[in-house]
Amino acid sequence: MKETVNSVLQRATGYRLTKETPAQRREALARAKRSAAGRQRNAQNPRKLPPPAVPTTPAQQRRQRLRGMSLTELAEEFGTDKWGGHWYTPHYERHLGHLKRERFTLLEIGIGGSVKPGKGGWSLRMWKWYFPKARIVGLDLYDKSFVDAPRIRTYQGSQDDPAVLRRILQEEGAPLVAIDDGSHRSEHVLETFRILFPLLPAGATYVIEDTQTSYWPRLGGDRDRESKTTTMGMVKQMVDGLNYEEFLDEDYEPTYSDTNVVAVHCYHNLVFIEKGSNMEGSNPAKKERLLPENQVTREPASAGDS
Ligand SMILES: C[S@@+](CC[C@H](N)C(=O)[O-])C[C@H]1O[C@@H](n2cnc3c(N)ncnc32)[C@H](O)[C@@H]1O
């Protein structure tokens, strides 16, 4: 018996090809025409999306304006000298921009306005708008509680007082960003770093502003650029400390900064220090220490030595 396409198909799949009737063909043609006409209509008149929510009240309009601003624009809006007096905001955006949508605590030492009542809070307000999910905490020698607002909390005390720093961390959590824009006196900057840096989590960024005071004796600085007691003296030691595993001294004891600073970025008057584990180990140093010229030569023992 002669096999047809349909009999083979039916055996294999259980289906048969059916012929379209003229009526079915007319209906398919009409359907195709209707959908082509619909596509053309849509292209000429794209479907209207609902309009974006228009801020109606002045407060809503202000919020929308602030949300769209860069850090530099926010600095200008709120009057901090992080842009204008200094040129820090692009560096901040570069190092902290990745935290824009994150939930974290930012602590800034130095709220501004010093002893003047009702003055200060400029940078805290800037941070609040730049980091819409962050908790913004400030510390100042003077009472700045007038700056307190949703997501902004101020504390009063000196930046080198371990008790006040520990209290802030207990109440606010360990900051992922800590900024020292306080007295700018080298002894305060060094002491604050000594207390605060070990309390920060890995991944934290510690910022020191206005490092120019390192060279000014009136603010605890030193004309001697080799001095180790100034802010920049500490920072320069930290830069060497990044490579402590390469030192040839057998008895070198790494400092906390040596083992916990993974990067130091220096700009004009501004330093960013990144926290993390700096313990990669060093193969080249092992070989280098074995070279005869790097062996420590000891004095031969004298006859009287036991
Ligand atoms: C440069 S202003 C801070 C400006 C602010 N961060 C801004 O960018 O808008 C310095 C502030 O540090 C405060 N300050 C000075 N010595 C301090 C100390 N030992 N501890 C805490 N704050 C101090 C001053 O009262 C002053 O308000």
Image: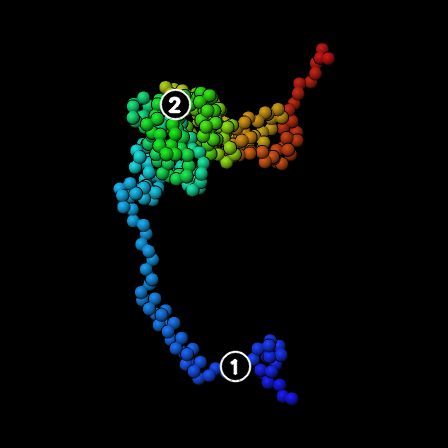
Name the residue located 43 percent from the left edge and 82 percent from the top edge.
Answer: 23
Instruction: Spot the residue most to the bottom.
Output: 1
Image quadrant where residue 89 sits: top left
Name the residue located 39 percent from the left edge and 23 percent from the top edge.
Answer: 156
Q: Position of residue 43 (x, y in %)?
A: 34, 66
Q: Which mark is residue 304?
A: none
Q: Position of residue 62 (x, y in %)?
A: 29, 41
How far apart marks 1 and 2 lie (CA) works out to 88 Å
Q: Quadrant where the C terminus lies?
A: top right
Identify the amino acid type marked 1. Answer: Thr
Kindly state the secondary structure of the residue where label 2 is placed: strand
Residues 52 and 121: in front is: 52
Residue topped by disc 1: 18
Residue 86 in sight in this render: no
Q: Which mark is residue 156?
A: 2
Looking at the image, residue 220 sits to the left or right of residue 281; the answer is left
Mark 1 surroundings within 10 Å by alpha-carbon count, few (fewer than 14), some (14 through 19), many (20 or more): few
Identify the amino acid type marked 2. Answer: Gln
Residues 62 and 205: in front is: 62
State whether label 2 is within 8 Å of ligand 1. no
- Tell us which disc is closer to us: 1 or 2: 1
Mark 2 surroundings within 10 Å by alpha-carbon count, few (fewer than 14), some (14 through 19), many (20 or more): some
Residue 68 in sight in this render: yes
Q: Position of residue 51 (x, y in %)?
A: 31, 54
Which label's residue is closer to the chain start, 1 or 2? 1
Q: Position of residue 69 (x, y in %)?
A: 33, 42
In the image, residue 40 above or below residue 206: below
Name the residue located 36 percent from the left edge and 69 percent from the top edge.
Answer: 39
